[in-house]
Amino acid sequence: QRLLTFLTTTMKVFSAITAFCLFSNAAAFTVKTPRSSSTALRMSDAQLGFPGAPTGGNEPEVFSLDLPFQRFEGGDTLRTWKMPQDGERVEYVVKTNGRPMKAKIELWQGPIRKTHELTIDMQDGDKTPFRAILKYKKGPQVLKISNIGPYEFPLMAAVHVPTNERAEKLRKMTEDLFEKSPKEFVQGGPGGSTKGGAIRTFPIPNNVKSAQMIVWSKEVSGKGSKALIEVLQGPNNPKQVLDFSVAGGSQPYHCVFATPGEGVTIRFTSKQFLEFPTRIVVLPYEYEEVTTSDTLWM
């Protein structure tokens, strides 16, 4: 009788423990209701302005480096940013902590259509950060930034989308700057990206610390632009190399190159076909006070 009672009690305790464990495991795999959070990329309505020809020192109000950056390691590590569907422009900045920078930036419209691609190879991503504003069509768009350098060379990137009001100001200012500035007509080549087309060079005065470029094919071809852009310091000595493409004449591309030191030249080589020319504008962005005539922007 005692043995039967002991066995009965033991079985009840074992059943209770088993039921508790099964309940805990079930609870662990229960699907929880996801929390919604907004990840829209918007910029504050800061005062805007594009500097014109150099007549004195200036403080830039766009292409700011004072942005929240995300760091990610090398070895093809990447980050993606979903663009607001009512947005029209995105600003991005990439830099390093003083190490070489190898990065790829892409804008995707759906899973197979890529409307923008930029491959960056720079010797010092802290001394020469890269800044750009890209216009895109409304709709589902994803910006992808990849660190294609070695694992030891981390990359820092910042991405912002302006509000609709600021985007409209940027549109007017970009168009005004492009229309009122001297433009270089750049013809494509017979083999497109295989043989290359026309080459344009822009010597940078020593007092100019950064130069801005607008690439836009409207009113000449309306097609996409492809180019190899190099920032040289010395005879055929590239410090910054950018392999660039953007789709459509409705998408102006506005970027800023850091040009520290002396003897800097920007070289623009078209990689588009002969039938698809484009126009570019190159102007100073950050500069020091002009003191002698040999530092004037030509």
Image: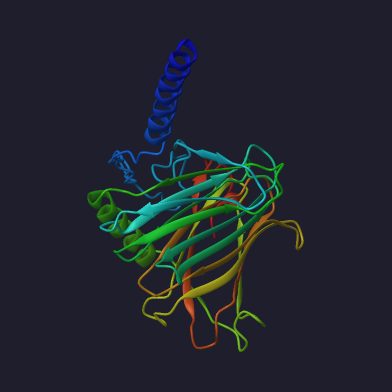
> Please, which residue is most extreme toward the left here?
165
Compared with 119, 80 (above or below) is above
- Quadrant that contains the N terminus: top left
Q: How far from the left and from the top, in percent, is residue 25?
A: 43, 33
Q: Where is residue 3 drawn, in percent x and y?
A: 50, 14
Q: Is residue 165 left or right of residue 271?
A: left
Instruction: Looking at the picture, tell me which residue is in the foreground, 139 or 289.
Output: 139
- Residue 281 drawn at (x, y percent): 47, 65
Quadrant for the C terminus, please.
Answer: bottom right
The foreground one among 21 and 39 is 21
Relative side of 102 to 166, left or right: right
The residue most toward the front is 1
Occupied quadrant, residue 13: top left
Color style of the picture: rainbow
The residue shown at (35%, 67%) is 179
The total number of labels drawn is 0
Residue at image coords 32%, 61%? 176
Image quarter for residue 48? Answer: top left
Could you tell me which residue is drawn at 40 percent across and 25 percent down?
20
Residue 177 vs residue 78, the one in the foreground: 78
User: What is the residue that sits farthest to the top in this orientation?
Assistant: 2
Residue 33: % across, % down: 29, 40
Residues 57 and 184: in front is 184
